[in-house]
Amino acid sequence: MAGSRRLSEHQQQHFVREGYLHGLPAVYSPAEVRDLHAGLQGLLALLKPGETSKEIREWHESSRFLYDICMHPVILDYVEDLLGPDFYLWGSNFFIKEPRSLSTVGWHQDAYYWPLDPHESLTIWLAFDDSTVENGAMTVVPGSHRAGLLKHIRVRETDSVLMLECERGQFAEDTAVPVTLKAGEVSIHDDKLVHGSPANPSAMRRAGLTIRYSRTNVKCDLSINPHFTTYLCRGTDTFRYNPVGVVPTQRFGRLERQHVSVEEAGTGAEKKLGRV
């Protein structure tokens, strides 16, 4: 694609066809990864008794440490090559599997969880630790994004951190592949790609930060998620559909907020979006 910054035409075509990319040059050096680990400890220190790392969600709005990661120029170059010149940041959260954790992430599509329209968003998955088959690397179903939104069902008795999962039989589960990463590397996936991850029976932690970006024409249904906040990364936002956030100044800060996704909003949100 003419004018690309980081990705070759082959890589961009692979993303369009398969819905994901990995095997890219590391964004952070080993020395910089050590700084990432120190920063993560600074964030974990802000958690209250009984909270887990899952609470560190959208803290790029309150922590300059995370905001700067989300605005890393190499990461933004990748996003621009895939979304185009005009896009914003709106989401981030950690997925940390401690050693010998039984926790899984069931098969799902990110787009099902987000009250966004149209579906023109992607996720950067930044590895803070090596992400391997042994410690529960994310697994994707190549090409599954091309089927559009699939039916999801609510699952109560599960080890998954998610309650809404893709109903089996709608995608080629036997074609799934693990996305392994070295610490400091990233993968990228389309918001409609079916993916999940198994448990971590190993002695190694698996920590990753997901960062969410959308084209500026993507509008959030604020009646479902009234806290949705955007930060323009590149280009211009001529649509101005969504609230704009204030860049944080403190290095580490909590975000005191009730988070709202389609899952958390309940079946009423699913019905409003025409998903049940």
Image: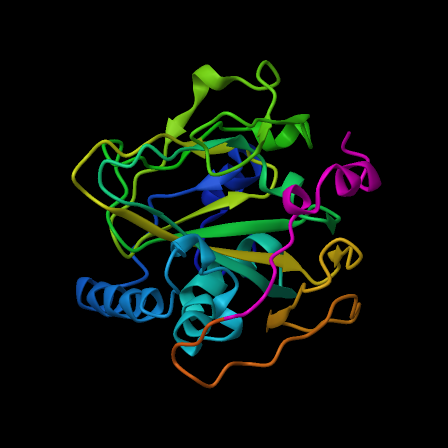
Camera-side residue of 46 and 165: 46
- State the extent of the magenta-drawn residues as a range: 255-276
Instruction: Name which residue lies at 59% across and 26% down.
Output: 166
Looking at the image, the residue that sits furthest to the bottom is 249
- Rendered location of residue 191, percent (x, y): 59, 43
Residue 139 left/right relative to 227: left
- Taking the magenta stretch, the answer to whether it contains residue 157 is no
Name which quarter of the figure residue 146 lies in: top right
Camera-side residue of 82 and 262: 262
* Residue 194 visible in the displayed image: no
Q: How many marks are shown on the rendered structure?
A: 0
- Rendered location of residue 68, percent (x, y): 43, 74
Instruction: Name which residue lies at 49% across and 33% down.
Output: 195
Instruction: Name which residue lies at 48% across and 18% down.
Output: 173
Is residue 109 depicted above or below 233 in this figure? Answer: above
Name which quarter of the figure residue 81 lies in: bottom right
Is residue 130 depicted above or below 223 in this figure? Answer: above
* Residue 152 visible in the displayed image: yes
- Quarter of the figure that contains the C terminus: top right
Camera-side residue of 245 and 124: 245
